[in-house]
Amino acid sequence: MSTTPDKMYQALLTKAKAVVSLVHDDFIYISHEPVFTQEDDQYIQIVPGVPTAVTPQAGYYLIQEEFEVAVWSRLYLDQGNRSTEKFANLTYGVLKLMTEIRSGLVNHILSYDGSDKASIPITFERGSRLFESPEQPGWCYMADTYKFGYEIA
């Protein structure tokens, strides 16, 4: 059984929405650039990577691909220690969101049609520290890099 990258990313988006309880589904999206509105103060961005062919055999290819999951949060810099709360609070902070995402994605096998025969489990590659965005003043982000694989015909 083989698949396409768009089906795998739709399965990844569905899984991310299922494991995150603190961010509304409308604010979890796939994009190369962050998208900000005034409607919420936390966003989850899935950044697709570049596919790499691993095993070209008999017309089928195993593709491995790294992708990032970035959690964006408004800092509210003018409100004292609220920035620290947005990062470390165990109920609604960035670290809480990253924990939900990590526990939901690591070793998960993506399925776009109820069959998991076309993919290999998601692995955690590396994390990052919290950054304040120079392009988006008042916002911070933290990103993890994962890898997954799938067969294409």
Image (cartoon, grey):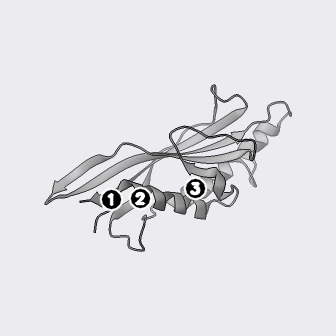
99 relative to 58 in the view: left or right:
right
* Residue drawn at 65 percent across, 55 percent down: 26
Spatial distance from mark 3 to mark 1, Cα to Cα?
21 Å
Q: Please report the residue visible at 16 percent of the width from the left and 58 percent of the height from the top.
A: 59
Q: Position of residue 38 (x, y in %)?
A: 75, 41
Residue 146 coordinates in the image, percent (x, y): 45, 49
Q: Which residue is mark 3?
A: 101
Give, as a three-letter code, the residue at label 2: Met
Q: Residue furthest right?
A: 79
Instruction: Mark 3 vs mark 2: give the one in front.
Output: 2
Disc 3 to disc 1: CB gap under 8 Å: no
Closer to viewer: mark 2 or mark 1 = 2
Q: Is residue 153 left or right of residue 73?
A: left
Secondary structure beneath dot 1 equals strand
Q: Position of residue 101 (x, y in %)?
A: 58, 55
Q: Amino acid at mark 1?
A: Tyr
Pointers 3 and 2 in contact (C-beta within 8 Å): no
User: Does any portion of residue 45 appear in the rendered image?
Assistant: yes
Q: Quadrant of residue 77?
A: top right
Horizontal and vertical percent for residue 13? 52, 57
Amino acid type, mark 3: Ile
Q: Which residue is mark 2?
A: 8
In the picture as drawn, the residue positioned furthest to the bottom comes out as: 114
Viewer-proximal residue, 89 or 153? 153
Q: Nearer the viewer, residue 98 or 55?
A: 55
> Which circle marks residue 100 in the picture?
none
Q: Assess whether mark 1 and mark 2 are in contact (beta carbons under 8 angstroms).
A: yes
Foreground mark, 3 or 1, reads: 1
| Residue assigned mark 1 | 150
Real-space CA distance between mark 3 and mark 2, rounded to the nearest whole angstrom: 17 Å
